[in-house]
Image (cartoon, coloured by chain):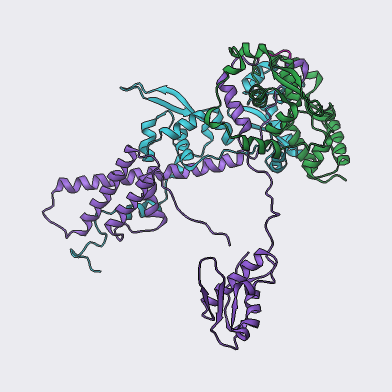
Chain colours: A cyan, B purple, C green
């Protein structure tokens, strides 16, 4: 049974928080266990949904925070005006995908996968705070290794990178692989004649 | 009529190759060699800054493709060097593996786009403590702020924001269709025989009506019902009826234009 | 009978607002009447109280805003004191930047640039001693003009405002800024419901 004081205390602290607050911090501030905080938050998520509130309690980037309900976006946008002014380019998204799934990863490794140099795009992503240096390759050269940041998770509304769909889901299906293989045939499939007719 | 200009710009050789093989369903060996090379050269030229690494990659892949194709076209040589052939297979497999990996992450990126679009519909509360009694408690708020942070904040604050409401007042709804305009002209033109475009549109008030009338002229010209002469640029257009004197709207098939 | 969409829309807008929002503004944003907004808000006040939420909907300075429930003050204080919130909100930082670069500047001018009312944020900045009234607009209305304080310069390690980093090439030209100032007013010039000076 959750102590009576926990729920409103959590609501009050979350109301003045500017970043997602981890359950551990909430537990410490309210003087309870992490398990109890998780229970309280999950109840609040359900209550707000059941009451059809205009706000939701979201679990993002390893913490909880108040957000507007997605359905209210048109009204909120009238007030905030800013909107998502900065759409991510296809190149930025593909680079982010590589970093997200292969982190920690070096710039060279990303370039190899994308087939282009990624210096410019990585600089932009770093400036925007979506990726950051997380380590150094222990091998020779000590290349800088990159990973995604909490800002990236916030941008995607994810709790952790573990919440991304497994990469295996995106492996091209047989039809695509076959098309690629066909496109890169070394010899004709119906290679029974030397001089090809037609 | 809305129209789009499709000029795909490829982010790299894999992008282009994937496009060539998958989206256009082109059998690369059916395309002539110069066609493949041309596509690569076009992309190279389109690159805003000449990036040696990307250019090299483009060249390498183009060369691999050319080699694969040459190998396919030449009569089978039983004496072919096994090492050469093995090398070619290896290169081809490497290329295939890299293409598959690239495609995997391209598709993963689509999911990221979707997630980010969904997440952007929900705005976070980032207000912080607003009541006086709490504001006084917090330590120095500028502790971690640097002058460049301040400049960035100013640039963010003054960056042009997307327009919220689209003003549609300048768009006039179409009152007349091209078919109607054709019908009107069929009433008059066969009888008059010859008219200038200025006269033809003299009684029209809205610019859009003139445009529609012009489209109708083009339509009848396309059908071979009239001839158009224009003596000099921006001069008046003479319209001469050369079709059947008893033409009616029913005898002409007029494309519907969607306004 | 209040239209169904009004309540969650009001909750969503209030959740992201930094300043108390007048019922007139809410009515315009949601597309309803002031009377309906007042009814919705008064129902919400009662609901939150009945549910013993940690936040309340308060009527402050001619508008509505979310605040923490008075009984939760000890927990909020603990959170604030822990320094977890010890940085300026993005909105406050942007407002401070506008004052720093455009001083002397009136609140109306800042609102116009930021696209939202800045009363609450300006109050915070003034309480903190980062900005202060420096003059009065000589024109009609004699709006109060604000500038940054010596304490602000000291905190940033600057000798004078002239030492702020140059805006450089990124700065949108004057025409854009003027268009923004003209075009993006949330509160109309003739809307004096907020009781703002100037």
Image height of B50 relative to A6, above or below: below
| Nearer to us in this view, C22 or B125 | C22
The residue that appears at 53% across and 42% down in the rendered structure is: B113
Query: Residue A12: x percent and y percent?
Result: 74, 23
Relative placement, left or right, of B225 versus B209 is left
Q: If the image is split into quadrants, where does the C terminus of chain C sit?
A: top right
Tag count in the figure? 0
- Quick check: can you spot residue C56? yes
Residue placed most toward the observer, B244 or A33: B244
Q: Residue furthest bottom?
A: B246
Q: Residue at x 79, y 29 (%)?
A: C20
Magenta stretch contains residue A135: no
Q: Indicate whether A158 appears above or below B89.
A: above
Q: Is residue B137 magenta?
A: yes
Front-most of A43 and A110? A110
Point 35% across, 38% down: residue: B51
Please provide percent x and percent y for residue A13. Answer: 71, 22
Q: Which residues are magenta?
A: B136-140
Locate residue A21, reporting x and y percent.
64, 24
Examine the image and state in which quarter residue A142 appears. Answer: top left
Dominant SS in magenta:
loop
C185 or B93: nearer the eye?
A: C185
Residue at x-position 78% and y-position 42% = C30
């Amino acid at each position: 049974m959750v102590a009576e004081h926990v729920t409103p205390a959590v609501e009050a602290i979350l109301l003045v928080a500017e970043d997602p607050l981890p359950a551990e911090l909430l537990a410490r501030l309210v003087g309870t266990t992490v398990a109890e905080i998780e229970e309280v938050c999950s109840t609040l998520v359900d209550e707000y949904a059941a009451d059809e509130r205009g706000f939701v309690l979201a679990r993002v980037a390893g913490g909880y925070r108040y957000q507007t309900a997605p359905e209210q976006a048109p009204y909120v946008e009238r007030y905030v005006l800013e909107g998502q002014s900065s759409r991510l380019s296809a190149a930025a998204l593909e680079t982010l995908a590589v970093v997200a799934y292969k982190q920690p990863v070096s710039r060279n490794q990303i370039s190899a996968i994308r087939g282009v140099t990624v210096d410019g795009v990585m600089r932009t992503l770093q400036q925007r705070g979506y990726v950051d240096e997380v380590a150094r390759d222990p091998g020779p050269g000590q290349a800088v290794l990159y990973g995604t940041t909490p800002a990236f998770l916030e941008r995607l509304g994810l709790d952790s990178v573990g919440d991304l769909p497994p990469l295996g889901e995106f492996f091209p299906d047989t039809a695509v692989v076959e098309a690629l293989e066909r496109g890169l045939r070394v010899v004709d499939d119906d290679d029974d004649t030397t001089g090809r007719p037609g | 009529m809305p129209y789009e200009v499709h000029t795909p710009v490829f982010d790299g050789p894999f992008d282009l190759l994937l496009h060539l093989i998958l989206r256009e369903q082109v059998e690369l060996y059916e395309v002539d060699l110069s066609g493949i090379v041309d596509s690569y050269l076009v992309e190279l030229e389109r690159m805003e800054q000449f990036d040696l690494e990307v250019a090299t990659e483009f060249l390498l892949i183009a060369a691999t493709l050319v080699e694969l194709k040459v190998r396919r076209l030449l009569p089978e040589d039983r004496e072919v060097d096994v090492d050469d052939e093995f090398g070619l297979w290896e290169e081809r497999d490497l290329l295939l593996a890299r293409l598959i990996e690239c495609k995997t992450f391209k598709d993963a990126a689509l999911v990221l786009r979707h997630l980010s679009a969904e997440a952007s519909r929900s705005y976070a509360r980032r207000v912080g403590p607003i009541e006086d009694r709490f504001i006084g408690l917090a330590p120095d708020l500028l502790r971690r702020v640097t002058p460049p942070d301040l400049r960035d904040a100013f640039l963010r604050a003054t960056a042009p924001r997307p327009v919220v409401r689209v003003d549609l007042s300048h768009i006039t709804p179409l009152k007349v269709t091209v078919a109607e305009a054709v019908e009107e002209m069929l009433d008059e033109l066969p009888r008059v025989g010859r008219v200038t475009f200025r006269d033809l549109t003299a009684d029209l008030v809205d610019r859009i009506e003139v445009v529609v009338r012009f489209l109708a002229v083009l339509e009848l010209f396309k059908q071979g019902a009239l001839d158009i002469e224009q003596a000099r640029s921006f001069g008046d257009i003479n319209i001469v009826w050369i079709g059947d004197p008893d033409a009616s709207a029913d005898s002409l098939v007029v494309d519907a234009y969607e306004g």
